[in-house]
Amino acid sequence: MKTISGIFRKKALHILSSLAVMAGLAALTGGCYDDSYILDQLNQHELRIQALEKLCSEMNTNISSLQTIVTAISNNDFVTSITPVVENGAEVGYTITFSKSGPVTIYHGKNGKDGADGKDGKDGKDGTDGSTPVISVKQDADGHWYWTLDGEWLLDDNGDKVRASAIDGADGENGANGANGANGKDGITPMLKIQNDYWYISYDNGTSWKRLGKATGADGKDGIDGKDGKDGKDGTDGKDGKDGTDGTDGTSFFKSVEVKDTTIELTLNDSNSTKIILNRVLPLSISFYDSDLDDKNLIDISKPVLVNTNSSLSIYFEVTADAAAVISIDAVGSSEATAKVITQAVDKNRKGRIDVQIGSTVNDYYCKVSVFVGDGTTLLVKTIEFKEND
């Protein structure tokens, strides 16, 4: 990344110049010099460049993913899967896949660490952390999501809040050959870059950039030379303390990601710890129980249920499905077992019971009830067979 590499060009040239001067002095005096310190500093700066490139890339990925997430909420989209992202054996984030919006990747990030003390002589001062802009979203009173920067609304050049979620298109006019509605507008995705030691942000797809805070951690300062001895001859100077390690930039974006049975809860790393709740799509399923009490027992329908002739029983059920699904359930009996489904509107057809009446005979083949469960896209058929209790 050319702009990031340029951050340290001046410092690197200064170090190389120093190296050349030291080499020249060594040649004139016939001595030798130890260049390990300078090489170590160059290596640290190269690692720093790589860290900044990864930081900027992950920040932009998180921003783009966050926009997809809030747009998915506005479009009543749902999560179909969540998969950990692993690098070098460690979990660094998640890939979240939506039913309509497709997959997005979010990174955990790490908090910045202080620069290490300088060594030898008097300790060098700690390196200072670079400031990392905190990009987040917030839902306003109008129900739409807007971008925030360091806890404040992100404003465009006109002073308007920058919207994160997409804007719906307007309805067409009524009547014959009514005019088409206006096209919807995409939400704006802020972009970040690091140039000349500073963070920059753009919210017009890179056409213009606004400078934010300083990006890179400052170097630790050199240790102070040791003092001369007090005897007749000058004591040898103490060695300079090595530079404190550069402060590391913080990269935390999402404070936590909590996967629950029916939702995924994202907590953003902003001053308000903003929470975003995503609904999960659950596969349609149904389970049967012998009661609706807390200590109910699961009925294994892979085996016949034992019954008596001319008897009645209730089989309770619970349906697991996506939160937005409209559930339909019905039961069809046979000549030896009639069935009726009883549900309650408060449970949205997800809980209830099947009342079964057993006839005067119980034939192992004909005495059964078929249960049909649908959610608009999937239809399940479960068969409960009955056997006479000996």
Image (spheres, rainbow, N blue to C red):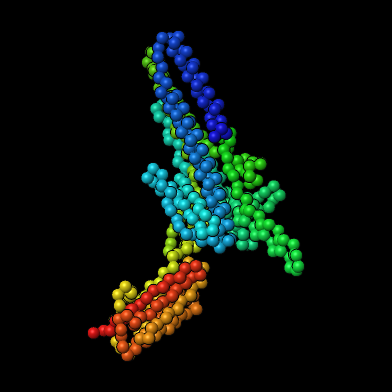
Q: Position of residue 388 (x, y in %)?
A: 28, 84
Q: Residue furthest left?
A: 390
* In the image: residue 99, left or right of residue 289: right
Q: Position of residue 313 (x, y in %)?
A: 35, 85
Q: Nearer the viewer, residue 177 or 68?
A: 177
Tell me how many marks there are: 0
Quarter of the figure that contains the N terminus: top right
Q: Position of residue 255 (x, y in %)?
A: 47, 52
Q: Residue at x 44, y 65 (%)?
A: 283
Q: Residue at x 49, y 40 (%)?
A: 54
Residue 173's place in the image compared with 127, above or below, is: below
Q: Nearer the viewer, residue 233 or 100?
A: 100
Q: Residue furthest front?
A: 365
Q: Residue at x 55, y 45 (%)?
A: 60
Q: Residue at x 51, y 19 (%)?
A: 17
Residue 284's place in the image compared with 2, above or below, is: below
Q: Is residue 385 visible?
A: yes
Quarter of the figure that contains the C terminus: bottom left
Q: Nearer the viewer, residue 140 or 378?
A: 378
Q: Nearer the viewer, residue 137 or 342?
A: 342
Q: Position of residue 195 (x, y in %)?
A: 58, 35
Q: Is residue 273 visible?
A: no
